[in-house]
Each structure stands twice: as structure tokens, then as C-alpha cells.
Image: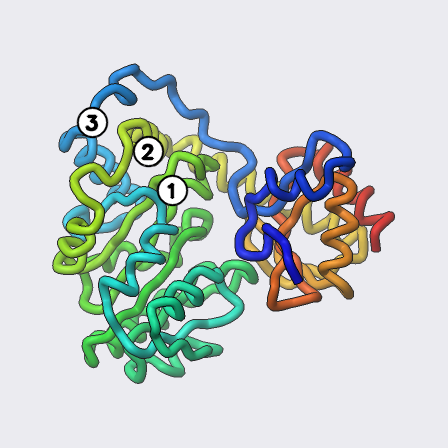
Amino acid sequence: MNGPDLIHGGALDRVKALYPLAPQPWLDLSTGINPHPYPAPPLLPHSFAHLPTTSENDACRQAIAQYYGAPVASLMLVPGTEILIRLLPSLLEVQTVALARPTYGDHLSCWQTAGANVVEMADPAELAGKVDVIVVCNPNNPDGRIWPPEILEDCRARQAARQGWLIVDEAYADIAPSLSLAARGGAAGLIVLRSFGKFFGLAGLRLGALIAPQALLREAQKRFGVWPVSGPALHVGTQAVADTDWIAEARHRLETSRLALDEALSGAGVTTLGGTSLFRYVQVPDAHALWQALAEQGIYMRRFSWSRHHLRIGLPADDAGRQRLSAALAVSL
């Protein structure tokens, strides 16, 4: 089973090359990125011409900490969370890591590459206090499972008691802020990863946050150096997280779009198992055959190497996209 899309979504250029006769334009539903991005402001030339200043970094850090409800002293800005996922194994140097599956695949692959013994769990409470690291995505990608914050806080305390760690990847927590443990930032044993690009629809900006005890932040800072985040990312991020009207409207719009997508999927006979308001997780008889049939019609969604029955579908940007998806499903199932 081969394909450029099996590790991540977002490989539209390579998928296009595989299906050169597909109708244009392509409908890319392979990611969980907001199809209605924040309207990035015009950037002054100095954002590109000069190195990011400490004051610019501090302003963005303060704004993002306030948005997440995190202690600013426990938050560090980073160029997206993907690099954090790859960095953490070398920072923590642990032996046994527990993951709930299915989940975002890079957590598994990065710990395995680092030589850790990775075990699967159904619930983090099962192994809290028994392994070196527990990793959860909350909400989970791709199935949208959620872990109540009080359960995760209990897991954190049990992990901390054995000098272990709870890593919570909150890449999709902007749509459900009540789930976040960001306010507990700095607590022993807790690492929170936050992504800016998904909810704000600006994934190419590469901006995220590491929320953790200060000793770990200092070690991470040594790895990233003095200019981890670009000037344009700092300027856009500072403005976006303070735009409360846009944030509220985005949450409402995403939920409305989610309901409309669910209706379209149901009408096509597709079973939706879960997801978030940024993506849906569905079950079909032959996911890889359906993926190919849709790709031939210029529609790209997320399939998985570990399942022939599940797909993840991002939100179409508008009614025309949903209608195109519905029509393609009608002739493909």
C-alpha cells in the first residue's frame, strides 16, 4: 500500500501528479485546517528584512498566553508543533511511552525512531503512574475523542509522582477551549502542545506554542536558538489571537459547516464515527477504493495505512464544495 498521502494530508501537489486527468480545480479535504483563514494583515517590509526582535517575540508570546489562558512564564513560541513532536524524545530521554490509538501518526513514529518502547492504551488512566510518558491528543486526531480535563489532571499528578510526563497535544483545542490544560502550564509532569495554524487557517505561517515547566523550556530554547519564529508569524499571530470577534465567528461558522457536511455524508450513505468541527472521521466498506475513485474526480481526502475502512474528511469551504463531494460520493459508493 503506497502513496504520498499515507503519512500526512496536505500532499496535494504529489497527488495531482498521480491523477493528471482529474477535473480542476481540486477539492482538497485532506487536512483539518480551517478553510476560511484569518485575514492576515498587510505586513510591513521590516517584518521580512529584519531579524525578529525580543519585543516582538514577547508581545506575541503575551498575546498567545492570554488567548490560551496559560501562564506566560510557562509558554515558549515555536515554529509549529510538528517540530516539537520530533524534538521531545531527545529532550525527555525516556524508555516507555503510552499512546492511545488511532492518533496522530507522528507521535508514534517519532518515539519509535528514538528507541522508546511504545505501548498502546485505551484510556490514559489505565497506565498513569506506570510508564515514563503518556501522550494524548485532545481532541484526538483523527476520531475526535475527548479526554475530560479532570481525568487528564489526575493522570498528570500520577505521572509527576514518578517523575514522568503527560504530553497533551491540543492542536484542535481552539474549537473546544474548555478541554485545555493550558491554564495548568508549568505544573510538574505536564507538557501541552498548541498549534496556531489549524484553527486560524494559516498553517503555512508555522507558529505554535510549547507550554511546560521552565526547566524544560530552557532546554528547548537551547535547541531552537534565538530566532525560532519568523517576524511575519509574530506579527500575524499577535493580531489574530486578540481578534475575539473573528474567533467567535469562526467557531460558529465551523460548527455550522460541520453540521452541513454531516448531512451531506449521511445523504450519501457514509457513516460518520466522530471528528471535530474541522474534520470528520468516517467508515466505509473500502476506504482505499473510495479514496482512489474520489481522487480521479479531483477530490483529495485523508486515508490511512492502518485501516481499509476509515477516512478523514476536512470541511469543504462552501456549498459548492459540499455539492461536489455529494455528487462524487453518489457515483463512487
- Report the residue marked by disc 1: 196
Relative placement, left or right, of 60 versus 201 is left
Q: Label 3 neighbourhood size at 10 Å, few (<14), some (14-19), many (20+)?
A: few
Which residue is drawn at the image coordinates 43% and 36% (left, top)? 204
Q: Position of residue 331 (x, y in %)?
A: 87, 48
Looking at the image, is mark 2 or mark 1 earlier in the sequence? 1
Relative placement, left or right, of 244 versus 306 is left
- Label ID, residue 237: 2
Q: Secondary structure at mark 1?
A: loop
Callout 1 amino acid: Phe
Which residue is drawn at the image coordinates 37% and 17% (left, top)? 42
Which residue is drawn at the image coordinates 26% and 76% (left, top)? 159
How far apart marks 2 and 1 lie (CA) works out to 8 Å
Q: Secondary structure at mark 2?
A: helix
Q: Position of residue 1 (x, y in %)?
A: 66, 63
Callout 3 amino acid: Leu
Above or below 141: residue 112: below
Above or below 79: residue 234: above
Q: Label 1 neighbourhood size at 10 Å, few (<14), some (14-19), many (20+)?
A: many
Q: Residue furthest right?
A: 331
Relative placement, left or right, of 248 versus 90 is right
Callout 2 amino acid: Gly
- Report the residue marked by disc 3: 51
Which residue is drawn at the image coordinates 44% and 60% (left, top)? 106
The picture quadrant where one finds residue 312 is bottom right
- Marks 2/1 in contact by CB < 8 Å: the verdict is yes
Dot in front, 2 or 3: 3
Looking at the image, is mark 2 or mark 3 earlier in the sequence? 3
Q: Secondary structure at mark 3?
A: loop
The picture quadrant where one finds residue 245 is top left
The picture quadrant where one finds residue 28 is top right
How far apart marks 2 and 3 lie (CA) works out to 16 Å
